[in-house]
Amino acid sequence: MFWTTLIGVMVFCASTGVALGAALGLTGLALLHVYSNGATSLAVDAIWGVFNAFTLSAVPLFILLGEILLHSGVSNRAYSAFAPLFRRVPGGLLHTNIAVCTLFGAVSGSSMSTAAAVGSVAYPEMVRRGYDKDVIVGSLAGGGTLGLLIPPSLSFLIYGALTETSIGRLFMAGILPGLMIGLMFMAYILLKALRHPQIAPRDESGLPLRDILRGFSQVWPLLILIVAVIGSIIGGIATPTEAAGLGVVLATVISFLWGDLTLRKLLDAIFHSTLLFAAIGFVVLGATILAQSVSILGIPQQILSAVAASGLGQYSILLIVVLIYLVLGCFFDGLSLMIMTLPVVFPLLTGLGYDPIWVGVLITIVIEIGQVTPPVGLNLSVLSSLTKNEISLGRVATATVPYWLIHLFALVVLTIFPVIALYLPNLLF
């Protein structure tokens, strides 16, 4: 009867076109009203507890930091600095896309912002140089996903706030897997360019080392921003929220002095940040109500008991969870999917003995895959619009398939060698 109510209310809300946050919240309220003697006031207490948490206040600040950088045009300078480094390597500027996405992800925290910032600079320049358009958008869509894994990450912030897991440890756990996936992307691009040289014209002209170093000297403001934000968290000098506030101040100063940020663009960045956090916050609100209801009714414990009775192994259950995420990723954006599923998935996986920090990395990677999975994949939509719809959403999705598969391979590697994610957190904390 319980599952009938849960699924029925969710399907009804979805069919009416109501927002996801409202669908989750209404479902949770219905469960509390029917199965806990109308104790809906418990939902209000849970909402207050989550939104009053100091940790969650870092989310809008990191969103604002990314929007300021996106509106300031600093990605132009970063791209110009990295471009000469890969000039003579097979794949050329395709490698630059991955490298700059990694750098921008280290200050943005958002996959979509990373793809938009780098794509707006890279796509027209690479088309002008004769690169294959499908390969360009594929590399940008894949590289953009690194924004969710390389700290500071909105995914880790929300995961840490909702599961009471150390955000500093989560940030450290994302560094090596993020770099590993970035290097896998570059290895794929290198092999593809060697087999099909026509996709990426080679530039055989040399460039003095002095000029390359001079180009890198232009990105020192971004490096200062990264060290200030991440270093203050690692060193225990600041909480994630305080580090985010420091990052916003530094990003504003850097963008005024080094980029082309104006007061008008700053106001636009604040406006867009407010809209994005409101959307995320509404989903968090609904998911909090649903999480409270399933917790009070003992649903996670029932699921764990059912799993234990099923006789399935630890890795079989993990595979099932990943497959469910891959399917749901076709219909929900990554952060909403994570918020919606954490109330059940987190206690399930940690109850099976998986490390909470490792689980955070796993979930972030599977929702990264959702960012490049149609029809809802946000990175695909961003890049299709950057091409002025010259390249359809379907073509972008097809071009991104290799990066989708690399993410799956990375999941296998991290499952076999969890130390890749856990080494830095254990070393530094």
Image (tube, rainbow, N blue to C red):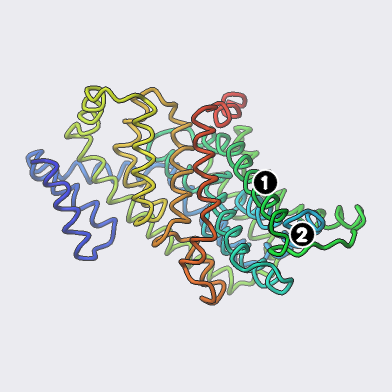
Residue type at tag 2: Ala
- Indicate the position of residue 338 as horizontal and vertical percent values: 38, 46
Whichever of callouts 1 and 2 sits on the residue coming sooner in the sequence is: 2
- Quadrant of residue 175 in the image? top right
- Quadrant of residue 39 in the image? top left
Residue that extends furthest to the front in the rendered view of this protein:
195
| Relative horizontal placement of residue 39, taking residue 323 as reference (left or right) | left
Which is nearer the eye, 28 or 194? 194
Identify the residue position indicated by label 2 in the image: 83
Which is nearer the eye, 117 or 383? 383
- The quadrant in which the C terminus is found is top right
Other residues around mark 1 within 10 Å, as few (<14) / some (14–19) / many (≥20)? some
Q: Residue at x 61, y 24 (%)?
A: 427
- Indicate the position of residue 228 as horizontal and vertical percent values: 66, 44
Secondary structure of the residue carrying numbered label 2: helix
Against 64, residue 415 (above or below) is above
| Relative horizontal placement of residue 78, taking residue 216 as reference (left or right) | left
Identify the residue position indicated by label 1 in the image: 187
| Relative horizontal placement of residue 152, taking residue 22 as reference (left or right) | right
Q: Residue at x 8, y 41 (%)?
A: 1
Q: Residue at x 67, y 49 (%)?
A: 186
- Quadrant of residue 93 in the image? bottom right
Q: How many marks?
A: 2
Foreground: disc 1 or disc 2: 1
Residue type at tag 1: Ala
Which is nearer the eye, 354 or 68? 354
